[in-house]
Structures are given as structure tokens and as C-alpha cells.
């Protein structure tokens, strides 16, 4: 087979300014796809499988671009190499640094690594575009679950979100180290949670000749534009928010997602996905915002799905993706080491496994339990000031009289085509401190039916009769459900949870037997089956 690779510098941008979305698929650059390691996967008898999930690499599937007919094939290259089990081998932990503080020497070094990755033969899984497709295949339901051919794997919208991306970045970083012959090299992180990093990092856009540049980004979001961690497509039509106000909104969003909405492991990591389950059981707090918001804000609005960053199947083609997810990974570090949040202890989570390619282009099977201690992976994060810890949202009003509204059963199921407010019964009011310590009262939006191949967003408020007067800095705003465009599965059903213990106390609603829940559609077609209050005891 002839030696094939993409030229250095992103060929996705043509001289006349037009962009070629999905260039890799259109040029059939993914070579030798299909069955991979069939003999090394787990047994196909479902009765012999435990609950931990593992992908079946012998049945990688293709899809169509959303809204088009172009084939998306994210399947890794064929390889006859035997899969080995991961063993942590780091002898020293090197510190990852904020992208906005990168020196010129570091920028040149990182760009050199990406250039080398892009220049590798496309049959080499270390090739930059093949690494992007590792993300695509695991995030767009390219693999069925081993032993359950009718059920796919999507590491988003479930408890795999944090650990899968941690190990994905780990191997990407190892490949960079190898190509640079520098074991001290580490990936940067985009510190969008701090005012100092709330613009697009200069190393990613200042020099268009470097491999760190990607033309498929929103040209209206270059510095000094402040990032919006809760960005929506509709926001493009609104008057711009003053930079200082946007910074405050972002800091309040970080407080809400990291503290108010992350009181238990399930709220932070997402809901369980076990062998045999359908994908999309429910996302954790950080995945919706800031993760999805940053993806969408960065992507190019001139593209159908804001490619590259604005869609999951194409996100890994932009080098800024890895800086973005470096900070996502740092949020897990902060959750454990600063906020003292606990990891999941469920064996099905700890023993679920995925396969990545190492710096020698060899496939390695990694269990989630291998990802828990980053020092054994050879990196760590600096202990920086967390400004957002001081930006707790405040109630717009307290103890409001609930307006006349229909009950849940009188409204749902229904399409969310307009703003809907309903009164939701609480199973128990005036809960004791002991009861609150033992279980987090949880608002659950149930049976969210949507198309994974379109951007979907709706906002959720509690005890707010005028959502236009609330925002990220108000307690009444619980958060959002956000779906980024996928390339594979079409129809999906999921749930979305919000923590209520502190929220109801702050709103003066702890003694009320009902709460007012308001859903505000922002984008996409959504049907909601129901809303109820339950209790999350996952921290015990």
C-alpha cells in the first residue's frame, strides 16, 4: 500500500477560503478499517459477561454525516498486534501548565509534535487524524458492547465521561513525548474556569502557520472575546454581554457545576452504563456545562454543525480539543483533591475497559481503575487559585408564592416546543439534616427523547415564574441539558438530574410540598416524558 498522509498544516482550509468539512471521510483517508482483534475480545455469550463494559472491536460501524450522505468511518486501522493490558510505568509526575502562560519555546515544541503526528502514515494509529478518530469511534457509538451486539458504546452521557477522556489524553501525551524524544513534555490545559484563561489561548491561534491552528473555529470568538461556558446557538443572535458580566456568569457557572450540582459521585460523573444497557443513561454536571458549552462556542458557525469543535465526531481534529479536555480532566483532579469528592467505587465502573494505542502504535487495554491516580500516569496539575469558589449564585427571590400551574401528569409526555411550567410534588418536605446528609434530593427530567445528530439544548429553572430575569448567577437557574452533534446514532432517550438540597434551602422552599419547575427550549426537537423528585444515595 502506498505511503499516505495529510500534508503539514491543516488542509481543511483551501486557498479561496472555503472549508471542507469531513475532509478525511470524503477523501477515504481512513485506510484498512473494519474487523480488529476479533480473537482477543471477550466471549460473545451474554450470560458469560459480567456487568463491566468492553468494546467489541470486530464490529466497528460507520455512519452518515448529520444532514448529509457522506460516510463517517472512525474505525481504527487494522493491526495484527496482540492487545496487552495497561501497566502504569511513570517514575516521575510532570506538571501540566495553563495554555495562556505557554512560552514561545513550548509553543514551538508542541506544534512540532502535532506536525510529526500529522505527517505519520495514515495506517499508523498515532497519526493525528487517526487519534481524532479514536475519539470519534468511542463517542459516536462506533463499537457495540462486547457480548451485546445490539447495544452500542458512547462514553458521553454516562459515568465513563471522565475516565475515558483522561486515558485518551494520556496516550495522546505519550505519543507527543515519543515523537519529541522528551519525556518531560506535557499537554497544556485551557484554563477557562479562571478569568485569566477565559479567552481562546494564544498558542492556538496567533500563528496560522503552526500545526496548533485550525481554521474551523468561530472567527468572532477570537480574543478579546470572553468565552461563554453555557453557550447556545441562539446566543449568536443576542446582543453581546459585557466582558465583566460574562466573566461573572462563567464563575457562577463553575460554582454551580462543581459544587451545587456535584454533591454525589453520580451527580459529578454521570449515571451508570453497564453491559447490556442502552447508551445515554444520563450525563454528569460538568459534561453539560462547561464541557459542551466550550465545544460549541469554539466551533465554526459557518459549518453545518459548528465543526470542528462543535460536533463530537470532529472535535478531536482541532488541537484545541486536547487543551479543553486537559481542563476537564483538571476538574476531576480538583473534585478529588480540593473539594474532597469521592470517586465511584462500583466494580462495574472500575473494571470496565477500553483500548487505546500507545506511543509504539500498539493496542493497550485499560481499565478505569488504572486511571484514578494521575501521578502513576506521569503528570499532575498545579494548585492554582479557584476564583469561582467565591461566586455562589444568589436567589433572585426567596419564599415566593407558587403561581397556578398544571401538575406533571396533566402535561407530560409532550414535545418541548415552548416554555413549560409545572408543579412537581416532593415526596417529603422539611427533611432533617440527617436525611439530607444521607440522600440528595434530586429533580429528574425523565425520558428526554431527542435526535443525537442535532444540537439540542433546554434550560431548567426552579421556583422561577419569569426565567428571562434569571441567569447563571441566580439560584433559580439549575442548569441545562445540552447534546452536541454525534455522527452515528439517531434517536436517543436519556434522563437529566439536578441536585436540590442546597437550592431549596437557599430559595426558602424547604418546607414546601411542591416546587415550580420551568423548562425553556433553546434548540432542537425534544420530547419530555415526565418529571419527578427522587433521592440519590450514591455517596454512601
Image (cartoon, rainbow, N blue to C red):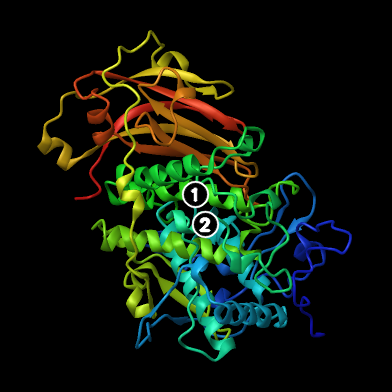
Location of residue 140 in the rendering, given as x and y in whole percent from the top left corner: 60, 55
Q: Is residue 179 above or below residue 201?
A: below
Res. 308 image quadrant? bottom right
In screen coordinates, is 21 left or right of 88?
right
Q: Residue furthest right?
A: 16
The first of marks 2 and 1 along the sequence is 2
Q: Is residue 173 above or below residue 496?
A: below
Discs 2, 1 touching: Cβ within 8 Å:
yes
Location of residue 213 in the rendering, given as x and y in whole percent from the top left corner: 68, 67
Q: Which residue is mark 2?
A: 153
Of 536 and 225, nearer the camera is 225
Q: Quadrant of the N terminus?
A: bottom right
Q: Which residue is mark 1?
A: 279
Q: Residue at x 28, y 61 (%)?
A: 336
Q: Is residue 64 in sight in this rendering?
A: yes
> For the residue carrying disc 2, how many other residues have a C-alpha within 10 Å: few (<14), some (14-19), or many (20+)?
many
Location of residue 136 in the rendering, given as x and y in whole percent from the top left corner: 61, 61
Q: Residue at x 25, y 57 (%)?
A: 342
Q: Is residue 290 above or below residue 87?
A: above
Helix, strand or loop at label 1? It is loop
Q: Residue furthest top?
A: 404
Location of residue 427 in the rendering, given as x and y in whole percent from the top left corner: 23, 24
Amino acid at each position: 500500500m502506498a505511503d499516505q498522509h495529510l500534508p503539514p498544516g491543516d488542509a481543511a482550509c483551501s486557498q479561496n477560503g472555503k472549508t471542507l468539512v469531513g475532509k478525511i471521510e470524503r477523501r477515504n483517508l481512513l485506510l484498512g478499517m473494519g474487523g480488529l482483534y476479533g480473537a482477543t475480545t471477550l466471549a460473545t455469550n451474554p450470560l458469560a459477561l459480567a456487568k463491566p463494559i468492553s468494546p467489541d472491536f470486530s464490529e466497528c460501524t460507520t455512519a452518515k454525516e448529520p444532514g448529509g450522505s457522506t460516510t463517517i468511518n472512525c474505525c481504527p486501522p487494522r493491526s495484527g498486534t496482540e492487545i496487552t493490558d495497561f501497566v502504569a510505568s511513570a517514575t516521575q509526575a510532570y506538571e501540566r501548565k495553563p495554555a495562556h502562560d505557554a512560552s514561545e519555546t513550548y509553543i514551538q515544541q508542541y506544534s512540532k509534535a502535532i506536525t510529526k503526528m500529522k505527517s505519520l502514515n495514515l495506517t499508523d494509529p498515532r497519526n493525528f487524524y487517526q487519534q481524532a478518530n479514536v475519539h470519534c469511534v468511542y463517542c459516536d457509538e462506533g463499537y457495540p458492547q462486547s457480548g451485546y451486539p445490539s447495544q452500542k458504546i458512547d462514553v458521553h452521557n454516562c459515568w465513563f465521561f471522565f475516565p475515558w477522556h483522561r486515558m485518551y489524553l494520556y496516550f495522546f501525551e505519550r505519543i507527543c513525548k515519543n515523537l519529541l524524544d522528551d519525556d518531560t513534555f506535557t499537554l497544556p490545559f485551557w484554563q477557562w474556569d479562571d478569568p485569566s484563561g477565559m479567552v481562546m489561548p494564544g498558542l492556538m491561534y496567533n500563528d496560522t502557520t503552526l500545526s496548533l491552528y485550525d481554521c474551523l473555529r468561530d472567527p468572532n470568538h477570537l480574543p478579546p472575546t470572553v468565552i461563554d461556558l453555557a453557550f447556545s446557538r441562539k446566543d449568536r443572535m443576542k446582543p453581546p454581554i459585557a466582558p465583566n458580566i460574562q466573566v461573572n456568569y462563567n464563575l457562577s457557572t463553575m460554582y454551580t457545576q462543581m459544587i451545587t450540582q456535584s454533591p454525589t459521585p453520580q451527580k459529578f460523573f454521570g449515571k451508570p452504563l453497564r453491559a447490556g444497557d442502552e447508551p445515554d443513561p444520563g450525563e454528569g454536571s460538568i459534561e453539560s456545562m462547561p464541557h459542551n458549552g466550550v465545544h460549541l462556542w469554539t466551533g465554526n458557525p459557518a459549518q453545518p454543525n459548528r465543526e470542528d469543535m462543535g460536533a463530537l465526531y470532529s472535535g478531536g481534529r482541532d488541537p484545541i480539543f486536547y487543551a479543553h479536555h486537559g481542563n476537564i480532566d483538571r476538574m476531576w483532579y480538583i473534585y478529588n483533591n480540593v473539594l474532597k469528592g469521592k470517586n465511584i467505587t462500583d466494580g462495574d465502573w472500575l473494571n470496565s475497559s477500553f483500548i487505546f494505542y500507545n506511543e509504539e502504535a500498539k493496542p493497550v487495554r485499560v481499565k478505569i481503575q488504572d486511571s484514578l491516580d494521575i501521578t502513576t500516569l506521569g503528570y499532575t496539575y498545579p494548585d492554582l487559585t479557584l476564583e469561582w469558589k467565591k461566586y455562589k449564585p444568589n436567589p433572585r427571590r426567596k419564599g415566593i408564592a407558587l403561581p397556578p400551574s398544571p401538575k406533571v401528569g396533566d402535561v407530560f409526555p409532550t414535545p418541548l416546543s415552548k416554555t413549560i411550567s409545572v408543579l412537581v410534588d416532593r415526596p417529603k418536605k422539611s427533611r432533617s439534616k440527617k436525611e439530607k446528609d444521607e440522600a440528595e434530593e434530586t429533580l429528574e427530567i425523565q425520558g428526554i427523547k431527542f435526535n443525537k445528530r442535532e444540537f439540542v439544548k433546554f434550560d431548567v429553572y426552579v421556583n422561577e415564574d419569569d426565567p428571562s430575569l434569571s441567569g447563571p448567577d441566580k439560584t433559580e437557574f439549575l442548569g441545562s441539558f445540552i447534546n452536541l452533534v454525534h455522527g452515528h446514532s439517531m434517536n436517543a432517550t436519556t434522563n437529566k438530574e439536578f441536585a436540590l438540597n442546597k437550592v431549596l434551602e437557599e430559595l426558602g422552599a424547604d418546607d414546601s410540598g411542591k416546587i415550580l419547575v420551568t423548562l425553556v427550549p433553546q434548540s432542537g426537537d425534544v420530547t419530555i416524558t415526565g418529571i419527578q423528585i427522587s433521592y440519590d444515595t450514591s455517596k454512601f
